[in-house]
Image (cartoon, helix red, strand yellow):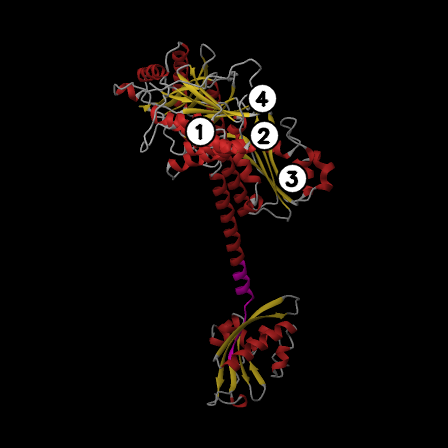
């Protein structure tokens, strides 16, 4: 490349350019000039720049007066743009690059800024020093504007797509009308919709009910919707007319609806879209969206609003149908369950039924309390297979049949056998599981049978929870089909203050986990829960039913026998020790020691704990059932402890003379040595061995001492 003064000029006077264009002779320079593109050559060493007429035209310079100085061009630019251009070129030169490209703004005489683009090549000496920069300069306003327009268009389209996708996703999880309302008004809901305010109103009979208000809304001010469908207000007018309303200013809103004029000064939005909600050709209501920024509601924005309205309308239609089905199913379920539970003497009962949160919220779970002769009563918790109205209908029939069989006075095993036969004779393929028990709180006797159901839980006075081994049979209906209607009976003893818990699988069934996990959780919550039946039922519902996700319905029955604490001067406790509980004996001894410590009688704890172990071991080894331990303080001038162990065996203990190597036979000898008095009393089906520990009873004057007990085991 030669020096600047040796280069032929490539400039073309403008009059020659137009003449050549007119004559059809168009060269490369002319084509570039027609596209507002010119060329330049900057001599770095000489500090001059040669630019053709088309290039000068890009900068708005007169070819006749241009002095070939770079500063003449640079002085046209604002300081910030000049600095940016200088930095881009200097950076390219210093970095050793052979080219550079930069966009910058050039103020024009008409007051507008023109986007200008320079694409240059840097020519260097052999030592790397630059000596010339040659390139093209172009008016890039149209290119940049179009690019900005396309970017803005793409951003708007992405935003609209995002609004539709996020709204659809949020409403796809909405099941009820309340769910739809929550999705439209919850956290980030307005951002998701791309609006600053929202109002949702639904038609109910001949009135318009505003269900949701969020953000900036005129309906929050004038209370529209409380007085029927009034065309003076936009929500009602939109649903009655069935056409959308797009209002681009508050003035336009007031002009169309003068009734809103008193509130004009309090409105914070500048545009509003009132959209009718229509599904299956039926008007459901109106959705109003409000915007703080002014908008013209172009075609894309209107289509977006109408699309959102269609999504909301479909979701509301689906939710209304679900709510109607759920209301019907819930009413059916309520009609099938007992309206009230009778009060019982000697205890308290609490029942709970929780419908599933999913599906139709109806199923086959049930509970019942049945009055029986002689102040006894029956309790039952069961579950018919399925979660639909058919399961609820079968449940209702089965509950009534089981109540009738129990009321006739049949034993528990017969009640379930007949209930199984009844279910098998119904025109259904459903089966049922249940646990049924006859309860006598006067004696604490509980006779339990179960048909493929969970065994009950017993919470003892000290908070421990036992799961007695209740023998069971096949589920109702299936047992009859297989010809096996045997339901063996298990007797439990509920001592004063203990609690019996019956439940269905919805209380312990955690999705994706073994059911034993849920049972262990239930045992824990029963142990740590409050003592009262009502309070414990609420505690279990709160901690477990909601914990598992509530995908199944739940029936729960809590029965507590009234505690027998005695009096402050004569406290008393009862504890049942199950024969199959390996830790029951150790727990009983600990309970006795702790009770005497609490009663300020710790000096008697060693003897009482020893006797407790001996009496309980005798029962657990030589009988076929558990034992009821009673510990009480006798309110005499000299306080003593009375300890009683009751079992269901009629065989009495006998005194023996064990040899030196004998491992048993010393129980009565220890009783004689430790107790001040002891004896045996018949108790209904069994007996009670009792003893008193402490100072001997003071005998009244002239009264012979109590004889030594002579009862012996046969």
**x, y percentage for residue 102?**
54, 72
Give the quarter of the figure containing the C terminus.
top left
State which region is magenta.
Answer: 134-149
Real-space Cα distance between discs 1 and 4?
22 Å
**604 above or below 39?**
above
**For mark 3, does the 10 Å Cα neighbourhood hold few (<14), some (14 to 19), or many (20 or more) residues?**
many
Real-space Cα distance between discs 4 and 2?
87 Å
Q: Nearer the viewer, mark 1 or mark 3?
A: 1
Q: Nearer the viewer, mark 3 or mark 2?
A: 3
Where disc 3 sits, the SS reads loop
The residue pinned by badge 3 equals: 217
User: Which residue is at a point 50% across and 38% down the rendered structure image?
Assistant: 310
**346 above or below 186?**
above
Where disc 2 sits, the SS reads helix
**Residue 617 in view here:** yes
The residue pinned by badge 4 equals: 636
User: Which residue is at a point 54% across and 21% down the rendered structure image?
Assistant: 697
**x, y percentage for residue 24?**
47, 72
Q: Is residue 139 magenta?
A: yes
**For mark 1, does the 10 Å Cα neighbourhood hold few (<14), some (14 to 19), or many (20 or more) residues?**
many
Tell whether 587 sits left or right of 242: left
Q: Which mark is residue 393?
A: none
Q: Earlier in the sequence, mark 1 or mark 3?
A: 3
The residue pinned by badge 1 equals: 612
Real-space Cα distance between discs 3 and 2?
20 Å
């Amino acid at each position: 490349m030669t020096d600047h003064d040796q280069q032929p000029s490539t400039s073309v006077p403008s009059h020659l350019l137009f003449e050549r264009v007119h004559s059809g002779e168009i060269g490369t320079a002319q084509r570039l000039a027609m596209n507002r593109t010119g060329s330049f050559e900057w001599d770095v060493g000489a500090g001059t720049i040669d630019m053709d007429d088309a290039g000068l035209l890009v900068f708005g310079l007169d070819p006749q007066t241009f002095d070939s100085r770079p500063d003449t061009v640079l002085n046209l630019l604002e300081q910030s743009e000049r600095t940016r251009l200088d930095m881009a070129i200097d950076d390219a030169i210093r970095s050793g690059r052979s080219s550079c490209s930069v966009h910058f703004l050039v103020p024009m005489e008409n007051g507008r800024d023109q986007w200008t683009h320079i694409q240059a090549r840097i020519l260097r000496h052999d030592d790397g020093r630059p000596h010339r920069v040659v390139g093209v300069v172009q008016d890039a306003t149209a290119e940049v504007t179009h690019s900005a327009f396309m970017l803005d268009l793409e951003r708007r389209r992405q935003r609209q797509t995002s609004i539709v996708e996020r709204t659809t996703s949020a409403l796809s999880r909405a099941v009820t009308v309340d769910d739809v309302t929550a999705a439209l008004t919850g956290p980030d809901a307005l951002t998701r919709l791309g609006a600053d305010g929202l109002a949702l109103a639904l038609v109910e009979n001949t009135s318009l009910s505003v269900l949701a208000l969020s953000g900036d809304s005129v309906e929050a001010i004038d209370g529209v919707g409380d007085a029927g469908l009034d065309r003076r207000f936009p929500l009602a007018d939109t649903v009655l007319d069935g056409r959308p309303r797009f209002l681009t200013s508050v003035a336009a809103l007031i002009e169309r609806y003068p009734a809103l004029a008193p509130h004009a000064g309090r409105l914070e939005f500048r545009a509003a879209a009132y959209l009718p909600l229509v599904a299956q050709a039926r008007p459901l209501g109106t959705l109003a969206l409000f915007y703080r920024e002014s908008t013209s509601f172009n075609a894309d924005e209107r289509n977006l609003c109408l699309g959102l309205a269609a999504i909301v309308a479909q979701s509301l239609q689906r939710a209304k149908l679900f709510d109607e089905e759920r209301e019907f199913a819930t009413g059916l379920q309520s009609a099938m369950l007992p309206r009230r539970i009778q009060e019982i003497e000697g205890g308290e009962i609490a029942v709970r039924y929780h419908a599933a949160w999913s599906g139709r919220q109806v199923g086959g779970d049930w509970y019942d309390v049945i009055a029986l002769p002689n102040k006894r009563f029956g309790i039952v918790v069961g579950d018919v297979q399925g979660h639909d109205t058919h399961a609820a209908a079968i449940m209702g029939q089965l509950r009534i049949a089981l109540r009738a069989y129990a009321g006739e006075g049949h034993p528990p095993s017969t009640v379930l056998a007949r209930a199984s036969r009844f279910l098998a004779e119904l025109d259904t393929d459903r089966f049922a599981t249940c646990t049924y028990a006859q309860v006598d709180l006067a004696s604490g006797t509980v006779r339990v049978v179960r048909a493929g159901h969970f065994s009950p839980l017993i919470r003892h006075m000290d908070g421990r929870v036992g799961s007695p081994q209740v023998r069971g049979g096949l589920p109702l209906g299936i047992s009859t089909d297989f010809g096996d209607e045997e339901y063996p009976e298990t007797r439990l003893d509920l001592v004063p203050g203990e609690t019996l818990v019956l439940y269905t699988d919805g209380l312990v069934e955690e999705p994706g986990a073994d059911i034993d996990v849920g049972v262990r959780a239930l045992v824990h919550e029963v142990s740590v829960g409050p003592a009262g039946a009502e309070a414990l039922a609420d505690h279990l519902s709160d901690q477990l039913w909601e914990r598992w996700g509530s995908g199944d319905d739940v029936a729960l029955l809590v029965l507590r026998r009234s505690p027998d604490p005695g009096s402050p001067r004569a406290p008393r406790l009862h504890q049942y020790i199950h024969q199959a509980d390996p830790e029951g004996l150790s727990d009983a001894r600990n309970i006795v020691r702790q009770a005497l410590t609490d009663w300020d009688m710790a000096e008697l704890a060693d003897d009482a704990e020893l006797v407790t172990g001996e009496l309980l071991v005798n029962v657990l080894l030589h009988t076929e059932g558990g034992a009821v331990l009673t510990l009480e303080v006798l309110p005499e001038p000299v306080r003593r402890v009375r300890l009683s162990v009751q079992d269901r065996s009629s065989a009495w203990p006998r005194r023996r003379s064990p040899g030196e190597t004998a491992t048993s036979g010393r129980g009565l000898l220890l009783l004689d040595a430790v107790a001040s008095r002891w004896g045996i009393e018949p108790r209904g089906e069994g007996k009670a061995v009792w003893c008193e520990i402490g100072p001997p009873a003071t005998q009244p004057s002239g009264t012979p001492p109590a004889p030594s007990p002579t009862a012996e085991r046969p």
